[in-house]
Image (cartoon, rainbow, N blue to C red):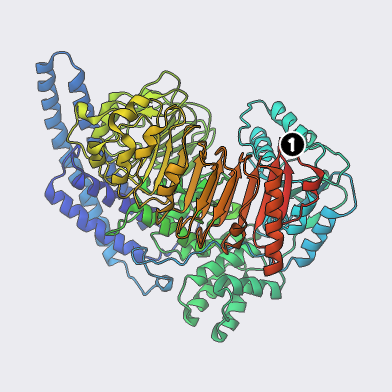
Amino acid sequence: MAAYAAIVSLMNTINQIEHHPSPPISIDKQQVESLTQIVTFLQEFLECYKSPVADGDEADPLEMRIVDAAHAVEDVIESHIVNVIELEFLQGYVVDAAHAAEEVNSREEVSCIDFYQDLQQVIEEMDVIKKEAMETSAEPQLQRKVSSTHAGSLTSSSTVKESMMVGFDDVQLQLLDWLTGGNRNRQIIPITGMGGIGKTTLARHIFEHALVKEHFDIRAWTTISQTYNVRETLREVLHQASGDSRNDLSDENELGENLYKYLWGRRYLIILDDMWSLEVWDKIRFFFPDYNDGSRVIVTTRLSNLATKLTSSNSIGMRFLDDVCSWSLFSKTVFGDEVFPLQLEEIGKKIVGKCKGLPLSIAVIGGLLAKSELTLEYWEHIEENLSSIVNSENDEYWLRVLKLSYDHLLAYLKPCFLYMGMFGEDEAIRVAKLKRLWVSEGFLKPIINKSLETIANEYLKELVDRNLILVHELGVVGNIKYCKMHDLLRDLCLKEAEKQRFYYVLGQHCPQGINSQRRIVMETMSSRARSFLCHGNTVPELLDFRFLRTYEYSRGYLEENVFQLVNLRYLSAKFREGFQIPSSISLLWNLHTLIVDSPKKLTAPVEIWKMHQLKHVEFANAGMYLPDPRSGHSDVMMENLETLKGVIDFNLNEEMVKRIPNIKRLSIRYMDKVILDRVKCLSYLQCLSKLESLRCSTEYVSDAEYLQCISFPRSLKKLCLVCGKFFHLEEILEKIASLPLLEKLTLTFGQFATRRWEIVEGQFPSLKYLRLWQCADMECWTLEGSCLPRLEQLRLWWMESLEEFPSEIGEIPTLKSIELWRCSESMAVSVKKIVEEQEELQGDPPFHVIVKSRKVSQELQSLATPNFRVVKWV
């Protein structure tokens, strides 16, 4: 709810000022105490409050009054912050210093008097609302029976659940027959049906089916959506088909021609998910060759008339689930493989009946009940609520069913769920970015001894468990890397957020009252707000944006005045060639996240070391030089800094280690050997005792002797080394192998001087992912004892000297996949023998193998199976 988000945000604003090492303003102690007492009460009130108009089209008046009052207090506080910082900035740039000081002191005195008066007025208004809330009759709320454990004590058991395909076995068999049948012509196969009925789930199951993997040389999947982009669609298909991510051509026709050439002569399956217009097909159809080899294109769409225009033959129309299948899906969603409690069966079947066979509704309501107390009283409450919307207008029915799950979310989860609507339709959302945005918005309630990122991660898992957020992609160590939201649930977010004025998605025209919006998703317009996610191509005018907290603009370039937005907490932007970050960056007193993308190397101003609140700093693309703080800020300690990426020639030494004691993620690149020789930077890595992820590139430094002194902290979980081509890998692998927590290792370049790599028992105890890329001259690889006991994924790229694969790897019980790119054919054959041996021992395929090579001999191609794929790489 917007009211809860506004109250928590206000409390966070007060706390940030109170605990900042050098706050831009101070607030009267008595006013802080009054505010804290009022905000604490309203926060606890909202956590239990059940709005009497929750199901209506209008927002609750009391909640909206709380929203407006909390926003008014923040406006007063942040306006004063802007005024004070602007005065300090003015004082520093006026030539007549004496006159400037007198002028500034006079304006400061007037500003402070106005500030305390304005703040007292809004505090009194909030106190009136508090008294009204106290008088509100509060009957015991069934909503509180929902798993009431706040994330402070939440131990989420969230696991990534595979999409369940229930009730569509006959449809799946029919589709498999059409895909692998004898018709040699390229065929378009539409899958139609309303949102949430399982079109994408069916397509995904088919896409991953073993028979399909064996039958087609190439498989690719892309989502079209209503706001499609032809270039991105072609680029995504080409990337998945070829495995080459370097398709940065700006011209659609060039991309299309490259795709056509790559697909020609190969049997392919392309899935175009969520198509809304025939226009996009007309623009890309000619880039999918009809080679008379049985290629197929599957299109999922809600529009039946679009399906008839695509083909006059084979088409799948998805139907609602029958009672038996609905109950099966519901049971698995709520209880998994456990037995359904007998006392809940009758009421459970009534609940399922109200979902009318729509899989999405069953999954979401099931997700709600799975996180609730297993009491007959609560389940009857849910059934009564569902009964009340059965007779609603048909167009609104499904939205109201889904809204029931939203209404029963605990207050702290509602802002996180609603925020998901700010992302584009069908957008794959990077989880790391999402969590940082949640933090910058200020609506996460702090919990003692937990970072806000940890809290955000627990909230995300909670929403995944409830089937309100979908897992789109996993990281290599099993973490959720990307997530998505179903279209119907996004529609619910947009509708509810607009009703509560939580945010506004702004199109071409600016509606009246837009200046009252706190969060805006922008296409081309600009406005005054606290948060902007900019999806358009027009550079926004920043003059009216002094109160912004969150700003992301990824498609165009921003100018210097962005660093005058003093209240920013999250800034992600591109800067044009020749631009340098000004010293005024230090005005951003509360900046948590700074992501800078530039085509040329930048040099950060020394004032960046004065920014105590910085937590995540990333210099993308060309990277940035970070100055030594000793040139003017020797007493600085950035105890909040956890992420530092893209730094060039980082002068890591004893003093620097003291200044960044809590760094967790570090990405550094060395271009200058003098830096390394002078201070032996890499020997100090072991002093970073909390470092979990390290990427270190030294490929541009010709002399590799400096790496002999490198030492790693035992806390490392992810390590990527890009070495010089003549660096002897044996010298460093022994150190890496003993790291107890290391889960992911990537080695690029370097050479095996002894031409062999021997891994002995006890080494790499936690490693799950291993990739070797162009590590030259390794001819022999041996394993002894129980090494690599947890390995899941192995990637060998351009390892052409290695002739035989170590058979012991096939005995690792956790192994899931092996990829060989441009490796020797003899190694691929040896891997095939290992697969066959393990199949004989275990029965089922133990792990999947994909072999990609520029030259695929007839002998190698003959070895291909669903579990051992051979692909010609161009």
Query: Which sits in the foreground, 733 or 313?
Result: 733
Which residue is found at the position 89% from the left and 46% from the top? 184
What's under tag 1, amino acid-wise?
A: Glu
Q: Residues within 10 Å of mark 1 (few under 14, many from 20)?
A: few
Q: Tell whether 721 sits left or right of 660.
A: right
Q: Which residue is mark 1?
A: 279
Q: Identify the residue at horizontal 24%, vertical 51% (top origin).
A: 125
Task: Return the x and y of residue 315 as percentages of the image width and height.
Answer: 82, 53
* Residue 53 placement (x, y as % from top left): 45, 62
From the viewer's perspective, is residue 348 above or below residue 735?
below
Question: In the figure, residue 343 lies in which quadrant?
Answer: bottom right
From where the camera sits, is residue 64 visible? no
Residue 50 visible, this orientation: yes
Relative vertical location of residue 86 with respect to residue 56 in this rendering, above or below: above
Image-quadrant location for residue 279: top right
Instruction: Farthest residue to the bottom: give it.
Output: 343
Circle 1 sits in a helix, a strand or a loop, which is it?
A: helix
Picture coordinates of residue 678, whole percent (x, y): 29, 28
Q: In the shown orientation, is residue 276 left or right of residue 611?
A: right
* Left or right of 771 in this view: 278: right
In the foreground, 631 or 175: 631
Q: Is residue 384 above or below residue 512?
A: below
From the viewer's perspective, is 825 left or right of 104?
A: right
Residue 831: image x %, image y %?
A: 67, 53
Q: Nearer the viewer, residue 245 or 835?
A: 835
For the N terminus, the quadrant is bottom left
